[in-house]
Image (cartoon, helix red, strand yellow):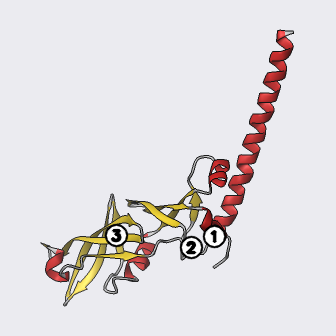
Amino acid sequence: MKRRSLLITSAVAACLLALTVTADAAGRQRIDARLADAPSPYPLRFTGGSALLALATGRLAVTASLTADDVSSLISSRLPAAGAVELTDDAIGVHVTIGRQDGVAWVTLTPSSDGIVVAVDSVEIAGFEIDPSMLMGDDTSVTVDPPIGDCPGTTVTGVDVSPAGVDVGIAVDQSALSCLAQPA
C-alpha cells in the first residue's frame, strides 16, 4: 500500500514538474515575442530566471546589447562632437576633435532613473591627459535615453562594458509590457 502511494505521488510530482517546465517555456516564448517587437533599435533578450515568475509578478529583467557603433550613436545624440568609439574593459574611448587636435575622451556609463549617465572621466590629446572640467566646465556628464525606447515603466539597472560590446540591464514592469508589444 505504501508503495502504491509513493508511485502515485511520484507520478503526480513528475506531471507537475513537466507542466511547470512546459508553461515556463511558453512564457519565455511570449516574452521573446514581445521583445522582438519592442521599439528598440538594439537586440533585446530576457535575462531573468523563471519566465512564469516574471509574467506573474509583471517584472522582467531584459538586456539590450549594443555594439561600438550603437554606443557611438547613443552618445553622439547628446555629445555632437563624439566620433567613433573604442570599447575596453569597463571603459569607453570616444574619439573627439578639439580645435585641430584629435583626442580620446574616456567615459563611463552608469544607470540612472532617467536613463544612462555618460560621464567624461579624462581626455587625452596629443599624448597628454587633460582634466575634462578644463574643457567642459561643470558639464562633464550628460544623460542619454535608455536603449529600450520611450516605454514608461522601464529602469536601467546596470551597464556592463567589454571589448565585445555594451550590455545594458533594464527592469521592465507590467505597465511597459503593452508598450513592448507595439512595433516601432
Q: Quadrant of residue 42?
A: bottom right
- Of helix, strand and loop, which one carries label 1? helix
Residue at 34% in and 81% down: 83
- Of helix, strand and loop, which one carries label 3? strand
Q: Of marks 1 and 3, which one's residue comes earlier in the chain?
A: 3
**Residue placed most toward the observer, 155 or 109:** 155
Q: Any mark on residue 86, and which?
A: 3
**Circles 3 and 2 in contact, beta carbons < 8 Å:** no
Residue type at mark 1: give it: Leu
* Circle 2 residue: 151
Q: Position of residue 132 (x, y in %)?
A: 18, 76
Residue type at mark 2: give it: Cys
- Of helix, strand and loop, which one carries label 2? loop
Query: Which residue sits furthest bottom?
Result: 99
Query: Which residue sits furthest top?
Result: 1
Q: Of marks 3 and 2, which one's residue comes earlier in the chain?
A: 3
Observer-side mark, 3 or 2, equals 2
Left or right relative to 31: residue 160: left
Q: Any mark on residue 180, and which?
A: 1
Decide: is 156 above or below 182: above
Determine the CA span between mark 3 and mark 2: 29 Å
